[in-house]
Amino acid sequence: MTAIVDHILDLFATRGSEPYGEDVSVAEHGLQCAALAEREGAGDALVVAALLHDVGHLIEDPDDAFGVHRHDVGGAVFLGQHFPESVVAPVRMHVAAKRYRVAVDPDYAARLSAASTHTLAHQGGPMSPEEVQEFAADPHLPAALRLREWDDAGKIDGLIVSPIEAYRDRMEGLLIS
Ligand SMILES: [Fe+2]
């Protein structure tokens, strides 16, 4: 048992049911993303990143009905105190990964949810060619793009998934402090 994992479980329990513009709550969404990551054979760090990528919505007050605008940055700072870069980087990059995909894949924008399309404008819209080049050079790009796929898919109303307690051991096994 560790204080930080208890704290994360408590955040999911107390604030996870808050809506943020999608058909699912933040907690349901994280659990669906983790389930998708597991199903695709992702390693523990990426499963935990998928589970916690939107924790930034749970640690600050929402900016509007779509949650915390800079939840990628806030979530990464929060997680960076306790988890390795293999968990933190995909979380930090998950909004930028949307901006990247929109810029490099014309079909991708059409697949985004209404909320995701709306927040894209707040988030800076598609990346410029210079931003694409810089982002593509990041060693965590493949992990960030995999997480982005699960992020876009994990919004299914009523899907039954494992509870967050099922991920306790994996979170504890990854802790750096
Ligand atoms: Fe998400």
Image (cartoon, rainbow, N blue to C red):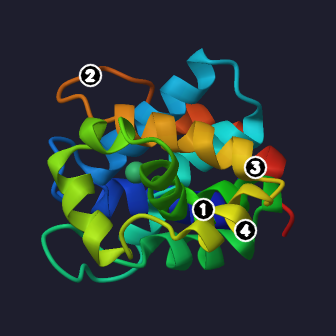
CA distance separating discs 2 and 1: 26 Å
The image's mark for residue 93 is 1
Q: Viewer-nearest of labels 2 and 4?
A: 4
The tag earlier along the polypeptide, 2 or 3, is 2
Q: Are marks 1 and 4 in contact (CB under 8 Å)?
A: no
**Looking at the image, residue 87 lies above or below residue 157:** below
Image point (70%, 43%), residue name: 143
Where residue 120 sits, quadrant-wise, is bottom left
Q: Viewer-nearest of labels 1 and 4?
A: 4
Quadrant where the image shows the C terminus: bottom right
Q: Residues within 10 Å of mark 1 (few under 14, many from 20)?
A: many
**Looking at the image, residue 68 lies above or below residue 143:** below
Where residue 54 sits, quadrant-wise, is bottom left
Which residue bears the numbered disc 2? 159
Kind of residue sitting beneath label 2: Leu
Which residue bears the numbered disc 3? 172
Q: Secondary structure at mark 1?
A: loop
The tag earlier along the polypeptide, 1 or 3, is 1
Kind of residue sitting beneath label 4: Glu
Residue in the foreground of this view, choosing between 128 and 2? 128
Kind of residue sitting beneath label 1: Met
Q: Is residue 58 in sight in this rendering?
A: no
Judged left or right of residue 58, residue 20 is left
CA distance separating discs 4 and 3: 33 Å
Image point (25%, 79%), residue name: 62
Which residue bears the numbered disc 4? 134
